[in-house]
């Protein structure tokens, strides 16, 4: 049963990471690209770490939990700093107007 849950977690993690890449590629401005990269990468990596911890046994749980905690703490900070740098650089926010 653990293997099935781990397989599903890997698939979900890969789909979420793939959607993050597509979002970075397709979104029009740095702010929406940053949102896609920050949120989806965190969720995707967390799911893949869950799958790794499920299949590896008890030895990997503390490491995986520590990585998820560190990602939880550092991902929003990094996104904020990149967004602040883009704002200071004068990057425009896409308004949705094609004209």
Image (cartoon, grey):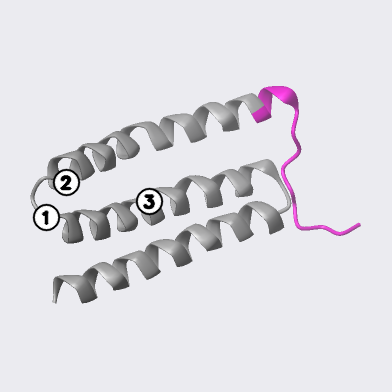
The kind of secondary structure element at disc 2 is loop
Q: Residue at x 39, y 62 (%)?
A: 13
Q: Residues within 10 Å of mark 3 (few under 14, many from 20)?
A: many
Report the side of 91 relative to 55 (left or right): right
Number of numbered discs: 3
Main secondary structure found in the magenta portion: loop
Measured in 3D between alpha carbons, the distance from the residue under mark 3 to the one under mark 2, in whole angstroms, is 15 Å
Marks 1 and 3, the one that precedes in the sequence: 3
Query: Mark 1 and 2 residues: CB-CB less than 8 Å, in contact?
Result: yes
Report the side of 89 relative to 22 (left or right): right
Residue 60 disc label? 2
Q: Residue at x 22, y 44 (%)?
A: 64
Measured in 3D between alpha carbons, the distance from the residue under mark 1 to the one under mark 3, in whole angstroms, is 18 Å
Residue 31, position in %: x, y?
62, 43
Reading the image, the residue beneath label 3 is 45
> Which image quarter: residue 21?
bottom right
Query: Is residue 80 covered in magenta?
Result: no
* Magenta residue span: 86-99
């Amino acid at each position: 049963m653990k293997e099935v849950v781990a397989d599903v977690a890997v698939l979900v993690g890969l789909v979420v990471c793939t959607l993050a890449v597509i979002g970075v590629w397709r979104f029009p401005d740095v702010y929406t690209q940053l949102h896609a990269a920050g949120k989806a990468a965190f969720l995707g990596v967390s799911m893949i770490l869950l799958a790794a911890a499920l299949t590896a046994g008890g030895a990997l749980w503390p490491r995986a939990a520590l990585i998820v905690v560190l990602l939880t703490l550092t991902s929003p900070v990094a996104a904020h700093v990149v967004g602040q740098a883009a704002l200071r650089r004068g990057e425009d926010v896409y308004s949705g107007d094609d004209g």
